Amino acid sequence: MNEFIRPIEVLLVEDNPGDVRLTQEALKEGRIINHLNVVRDGVEATDYLWRRGKFQDAPRPDLILLDLNLPRKNGSEVLQEIKSDPNLRRIPVMILTTSKAEQDLQQAYDLHANCYIAKPVDLDQFLNVVRSIEHFWFKIVTLPVD
């Protein structure tokens, strides 16, 4: 069982405001103390992770929820950069995307994504998916501490 003394830092990389809001609500209802940090595109995601510009004081995420279909830099490019960096590659990256394309799935795992979830279109199912993510990644899995 994973017992964190500090809040779990989650980075959500998502450009859809509705999905951001749903994720925030689902995580807020949970029993695990977490901080959800949101960036809206791939460039902001890499700036956040490498603490550039306005993200100089950004906390290191314990888990990254990454959409594939992002403006400016797509999620696959972000994933490749994360998993290529020895200081970041241990952070679990969960792909949470609308894409059900086999090519996207294969590429995500080739780039060492930790899991791939196609977002359900149904509101209740989406909320259940986020709650399941929280339960699995925050209660069952032992996350690395750097």
Image: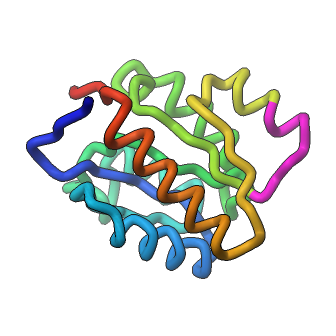
Q: Is residue 111 left or right of residue 27?
A: right
- Nearest to the observer: residue 77 or residue 116: 116
Q: Is residue 59 left or right of residue 39?
A: left
* 89 part of magenta stretch: no
Which residue sits furthest left? 5
Give the image location of residue 90, x and y in percent: 40, 24
Q: How is the image coloured?
A: rainbow
Start-end of magenta stretch: 98-105
Residue visible at 42% across and 51% down?
A: 134
Give the image location of residue 20, x and y in percent: 53, 73
Q: Image quarter for residue 33?
A: bottom left
Residue visible at 86% across and 48% down?
A: 100
Please, is residue 87 above or below residue 20 in the view?
above
Which residue sits furthest right? 102
Report how many numbered discs are placed on residues in the image. 0
Quadrant into which the C terminus falls: top left
- Nearest to the observer: residue 126 or residue 51: 126
Residue visible at 58% across and 80% down?
A: 17
Q: Is residue 87 left or right of residue 2?
A: right
- Nearest to the observer: residue 136 or residue 100: 136
Q: Image quarter for residue 72?
A: bottom right
Give the image location of residue 110, x and y in percent: 72, 21
Please, is residue 69 above or below residue 17 in the view?
above
Quadrant into which the N terminus falls: top left
* 102 part of magenta stretch: yes
Residue visible at 74% across and 72% down?
A: 122
Give the image location of residue 2, x and y in percent: 25, 33
